Amino acid sequence: KTVKAFAPATVANVSCGFDILGFAIEGMGDIVQLNEKESPGLEVSSISGDDGKLPLDAAKNTCAVAIQAMVEDLGINPGISIQLEKGLPLGSGMGSSAASAVAALIAANEFLSSPYEKKDLLPFAIAAEKIACGAGHADNVAPSLLGGFVLIRDYHPLDVIKLNVPQDLYCTLLHPHFELKTADSRSVLREAIPLKHATIQSGNVAGLIAGLYEEDYELISRSLRDVIAEPYRAVLIPGFYEVREAVKGAGALGMGISGSGPTLFCLSKGKEKAIQIAKAAEEVYQSIGLGVDVY
Ligand code: HSE
């Protein structure tokens, strides 16, 4: 028996929604193939597209950890061999580990004749994120699994809500050529948030969600602001403020760090703007001598 599944890249946080907002990107992602094997237990038989960087050890591999959580919940121990094809760069902030875990879970659910509804796979994906990034955040796995724009209203118990996506909303991704591990990028954050920052941040989350439903691009633009994580993380990303100036000049509604970075995301109204934004950003990266991939 063989089953194959794909899961997409995602942008987490979306500026103001630290650990609670994310959206899926069309087209790019990871593929997981599962094959039946005779002896019980999970094994990772191959990984491609990772330059040999990811662990084959089933206790450390995101795909295996996710499937292990699932089979333990079911109280079974099937023999499954896992093949992972990475389409996403590691440590990029594009939800690379989440896409692997989600593709593995979709494949495993089908492999085991669909014991779970899609949404019920989330806790297993979160368990895998804990191993991959040191934190069980759901703002990559939830949109990777459910598609579109997703809000995690609460973690205990998990309450995940799919949001409206305005027709003309486009995203440009700028992926500079260096790796930033989520665990490192989380370690620079502060535990305590001043009350005035909590007020600003909640106003913007509410504004962004209202903007998505009203399809009010100006409101979305005003709400793309982050006073909790961005000030501490921007310093880890060369050119952050210069790129922001340039993409705003090119018509971006806003720019922020995609998840924990170093990829930056820009939102725009319409495809034409998204292309202009990419060009403007590439010029800045070129001027500071940093290679970049643009999607
Ligand atoms: N919300 C997570 C963070 C996303 O910002 O650390 C990681 O991709």
Image: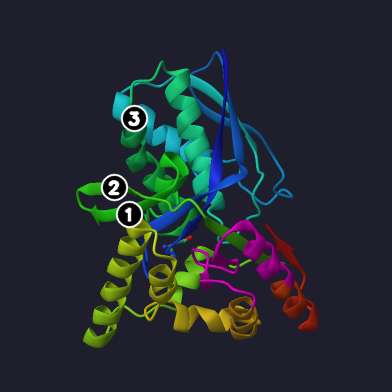
In the rendered image, residue 161, in percent from the top left (x then y), is placed at: 29, 48
Foreground label between 3 and 1: 1
Badge 3 marks a residue whose secondary structure is helix
Residue 262: mark: none
In the rendered image, residue 9, in percent from the top left (x then y), is placed at: 56, 49
Q: Amino acid at mark 3?
A: Glu
In the rendered image, residue 65, in percent from the top left (x then y), is placed at: 45, 40
Residue 151: mark: 1
Would you call the spot at circle 3 few (<14 residues within 10 Å), some (14-19), or many (20 or more)? Answer: few
Disc 3 from disc 2: Cα separation? 23 Å
Disc 3 from disc 1: Cα separation? 27 Å
Q: Is mark 3 within 8 Å of ligand 1?
A: no
**Closer-to-camera residue (26/293):** 26
Query: Circle 3 sits on which residue?
Result: 72
Query: Circle 2 sits on which residue?
Result: 160
In the picture, measured across the screen, residue 205 lies left or right of residue 14, that is left
Q: Which region is colored magenta? A: 250-279
